[in-house]
Image (cartoon, rainbow, N blue to C red):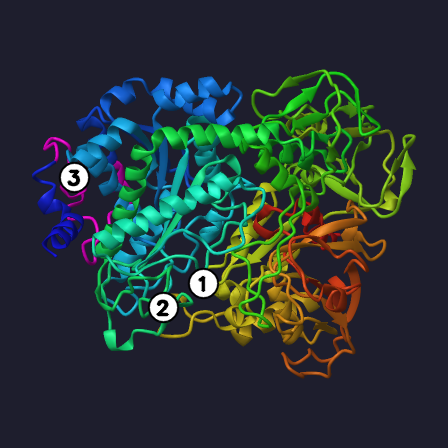
């Protein structure tokens, strides 16, 4: 018992105990912050953290600090290397060993030698989900402990491990959350979260961006992971443990993605079990495993590394606020995270009994989980290093998978093909550029095609992003409801992005060179003399960016109504015509920047063109922070749309007629209408659009405006505007209908301006989404806002339908043939002089389904005619 008590004190009172066993000149975080990390009601902001990292770096040769990128708001993202002085002096040697083992191109004998010589490389990060407040604070103390502590355990860690730490991976979010907490400290709103996203565009989805790599923070970290340091172990700290548990840690629940090497899965289990054992020996209860989180999905900070043969560790620790809380032991639940809480469960053997809970408790649990990982890495560094090589070698030698994946130069949307190639390269995959035509799969591919050969160490990553996912049926119990996957079930990128990729199973020969960086944009061409103007095809997403920028610089932009021949070329409906004085220079700039081809026109077919008014849109933004709003805003800005953010008060009071279109991103109708209830947030951030706002939007549409509603927001529009549309999946149980985060086949319903530039068949991202039935218009006032007197009844036109067969493209679906088959997926409803355009899905979901972006863009531009 005395030993247990000592160990517990050792863990819980580092400021007292470590003063005996640390190097004094290395400052502790409290020397800069003015309080101990984890103290009640105390948070350091990012400026304080930067000051501390700088002082830590300057105080010891055991730490090196560098900037690896900038956040979306321009804040520096810092990386700390922590190890022994000798290791850091030779860091390039050890980095090179880690890369050589990770790429697995060397012989096994040399790999054995490198495993003996090398140092285990371990990654830590904090601060990703900024509302989980402890880990961004904790990393400062973890860095100090590794650098300053003189225990035998830590000396061994410094000797055998190089720590690669990004102490705060989301600097913007830390300051947003810290400022909000400080402002509301001592008020009833002390433990609330900010009414805005804690990353400018994506909020919580910053941990959903790890294969698309849309955000600058994700790009910066990914570059270190797969191009610089190649860590064998990645520890991603979070704070969403099951209620009454103190920490979740691996092993995870099923399923595991079969493309992950079993050495990764068992390595995860090994480290998770070591963590649990450390907590048990320190008399720290409440450790739970085997619940909630799985190893299927590819898009998270700790899951993408699995497909790079890295051991990804997720811990989810309790108590995410500096405000203490008391848990009444008499109210301890009988189950925690689906496990009995009576000490009879394998994965919850030491239940927490309740009592006081403090912020420092969270810090301590995080520190000890990290120490368990580091202790294991130091003890088994040779094994981890060689296994890293072995898993990569197994991937290279795997002849059961494709020989190569080929991106032809001939694509429907060349810009998105190039973007997908660069996504894969950023993710650590090796690409080759064909320097001459070659034959594969019985077809000829031109020079300039890009080849990803399968024989590379990160093959699991390549295969998983290129091929469809087939999620296994899982039920909560035999005969019971389906068990939702952790996040997505299917995400195949060529499907989402509308890119044609040829899988070549048989070997072929091609004259190639390896791309050393990203695939650069080749300048587009300008054919002919644009005496009257220039033609531009509308099949590429980037074409919409170009016309937005051209119009904003003074050019006149038109769209072609019907297919025609001009200057001996055939132009499809929806093609752009750009005219205006002195635009030749603007056209040259766009061709250079975007790679688009422009075609000069001798004459302007004015009678067959519709001129676009100035393009300006509004995006509704609730005070209930909404990631779908952030992604919508990001997609629009990426394509240079002129936009305003419209809060509830703006909807009620602003002149909405200045916007050609207003978008309501996916959000529950109750959140749109009523927002945060009174008394749950500061008054300025309570309430929603309310009836006055609904009336304002209805008037806007009836006067000629266009309202665009995504997914859940379509229910809001249907209910309040009396549209002749019904959500066909409403109130269905998961036993009847279940499609969680999958790709579903859809098709254009016919020729229409809203599908111009689209492929006939395409994938939509369906995440508990919906389908539409067209119904008889409701009577005036039924179930919604009263119709304006003398306004014509709404009409509805189906723009996109779900397919009539083979609906599931990737992921998991049940009931799709009954409830989705040939149903409407996108509908345009007339309302007065305007339109309400309903999407049954999210066409911009997380910036991934590039193949459906044009449905949004067309909806906006049609409103500008």
Q: Residue at x 43, y 28 (%)?
A: 386
Of badges 3 and 1, nearer the viewer stands: 3
The magenta segment is: 22-51
28 drawn magenta:
yes
In what element is the residue under mark 2? loop
Q: Distance from label 3 to label 1 (Cα)?
A: 38 Å
Q: Which numbered disc flags the more N-terminal residue, 2 or 1?
A: 1
Look at the image and tell me in which quarter the N terminus lies: bottom left
Residue 455 sits in which quadrant? top right
Main SS, magenta region, reads loop
Q: According to the image, label 3 marks what residue?
A: 28
Q: According to the image, label 2 marks what residue?
A: 681
Task: Work out whether residue 522 or residue 845 is closer to the camera in this orientation and state it.
Answer: 845
Which x, y percent locates residue 829?
A: 75, 66
Res 623 label: 1
In what element is the residue under mark 3? loop
């Amino acid at each position: 018992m005395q030993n247990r008590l000592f160990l517990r004190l050792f863990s819980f009172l580092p400021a007292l105990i470590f003063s005996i066993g640390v190097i004094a000149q290395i400052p502790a975080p409290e020397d800069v912050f003015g309080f101990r990390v984890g103290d009640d009601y105390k948070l350091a902001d990012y400026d304080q953290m930067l000051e501390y990292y700088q002082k830590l770096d300057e105080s010891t040769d055991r730490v090196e600090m560098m900037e690896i990128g900038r956040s979306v708001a321009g804040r520096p993202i810092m990386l700390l290397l922590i190890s022994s002085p000798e290791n850091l002096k030779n860091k390039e040697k050890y980095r090179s060993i880690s890369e050589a083992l990770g790429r697995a191109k060397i012989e096994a004998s040399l790999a054995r030698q490198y495993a003996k010589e090398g140092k285990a490389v371990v990654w830590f990060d904090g601060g990703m989900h900024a509302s989980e407040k402890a880990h961004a604070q904790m990393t400062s103390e973890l860095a100090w402990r590794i650098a300053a502590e003189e225990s035998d355990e830590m000396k061994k860690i410094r000797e055998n491990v190089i720590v690669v730490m990004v102490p705060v991976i989301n600097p913007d979010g830390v300051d947003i959350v810290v400022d909000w907490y400080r402002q509301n400290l001592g008020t009833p709103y002390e433990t609330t979260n900010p009414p805005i996203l804690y990353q400018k565009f994506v909020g919580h989805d910053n941990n959903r961006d790890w294969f698309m790599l849309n955000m600058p923070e994700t790009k910066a970290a990914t570059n270190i992971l797969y191009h610089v340091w190649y860590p064998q172990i990645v520890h991603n700290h979070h704070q969403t443990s099951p209620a009454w548990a103190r920490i979740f840690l691996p092993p995870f629940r099923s399923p595991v993605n079969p493309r992950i090497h079993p050495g990764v899965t068992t390595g995860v289990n090994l480290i998770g079990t070591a963590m649990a054992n450390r907590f048990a020996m320190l008399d720290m209860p409440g450790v739970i495993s085997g619940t909630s989180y799985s190893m299927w999905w590819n898009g998270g900070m700790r899951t993408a590394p699995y497909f790079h043969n890295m051991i990804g560790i997720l811990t989810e620790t309790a108590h995410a606020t500096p405000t203490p809380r008391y848990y009444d032991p008499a109210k301890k639940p009988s189950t925690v995270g689906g496990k009995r809480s009576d000490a009879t469960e394998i994965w919850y053997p030491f239940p927490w009994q309740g009592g006081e809970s403090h912020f420092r408790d969270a810090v301590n649990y995080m520190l000890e989980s990290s120490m368990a990982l580091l202790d294991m890495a130091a003890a088994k560094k040779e094994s981890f290093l060689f296994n890293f090589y072995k898993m990569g070698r197994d991937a290279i030698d795997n002849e059961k998978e494709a020989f190569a994946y080929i991106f032809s130069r001939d694509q429907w949307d060349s810009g998105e093909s190039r973007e997908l190639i660069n996504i894969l390269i950023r993710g650590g995959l090796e690409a080759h550029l064909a320097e001459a035509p070659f034959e594969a799969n019985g077809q000829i591919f031109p020079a300039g095609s890009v080849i990803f050969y399968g024989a590379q160490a990160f093959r699991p990553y390549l295969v998983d992003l290129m091929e469809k996912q087939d999620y296994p049926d899982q039920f909560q119990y035999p005969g019971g409801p389906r068990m939702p996957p952790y996040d997505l079930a299917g995400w195949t990128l060529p499907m989402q992005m509308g890119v044609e990729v040829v899988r070549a199973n048989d070997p072929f020969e091609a004259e190639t060179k390896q791309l050393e960086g990203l695939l650069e944009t080749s300048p587009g061409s300008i054919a002919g003399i644009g005496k009257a103007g220039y033609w531009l095809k509308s099949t590429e997403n980037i074409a919409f960016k170009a016309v937005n920028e051209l119009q904003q610089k003074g050019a006149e932009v038109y769209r072609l109504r019907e297919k025609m021949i001009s200057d001996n070329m055939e132009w499809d409906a929806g093609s752009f015509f750009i005219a205006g004085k002195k635009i030749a220079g603007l056209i040259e700039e766009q061709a250079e920047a975007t790679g688009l081809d422009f075609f000069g026109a001798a004459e302007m077919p004015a009678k067959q063109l519709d001129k676009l008014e100035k393009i300006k849109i509004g995006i509704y933004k609730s005070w209930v922070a909404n990631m779908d709003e952030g992604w919508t805003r990001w997609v629009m800005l990426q394509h240079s749309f002129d936009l305003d953010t419209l809060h509830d008060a703006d909807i009620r009071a602003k002149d909405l007629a200045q916007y050609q279109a207003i978008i309501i991103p996916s959000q529950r109708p109750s959140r749109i209408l009523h927002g945060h209830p009174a008394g749950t947030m500061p008054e300025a951030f309570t309430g929603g659009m309310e009836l006055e706002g609904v009336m304002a939007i209805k008037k806007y549409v009836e006067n000629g405006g266009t309202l665009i509603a995504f997914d859940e927001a379509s229910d809001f529009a249907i209910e309040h505007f009396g549209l002749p549309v019904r959500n066909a999946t409403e109130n269905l149980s998961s036993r009847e209908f279940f499609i969680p985060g999958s790709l579903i086949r859809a098709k254009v319903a016919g020729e229409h301006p809203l599908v111009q530039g689209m492929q006939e068949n395409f994938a939509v991202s369906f995440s508990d989404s919906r389908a539409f039935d067209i119904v008889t218009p409701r009577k005036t006032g039924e179930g919604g806002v009263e119709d304006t007197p003398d306004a014509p009844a709404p009409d509805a036109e189906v723009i996109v339908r779900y397919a009539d067969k083979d609906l599931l493209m990737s992921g998991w679906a049940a009931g799709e043939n009954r409830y989705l088959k040939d149903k409407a997926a996108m509908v345009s409803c007339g309302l007065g002089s305007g339109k309400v355009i309903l999407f049954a899905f999210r066409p911009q979901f997380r910036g991934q389904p590039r193949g459906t972006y044009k449905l949004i863009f067309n909806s906006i531009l049609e409103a500008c005619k």
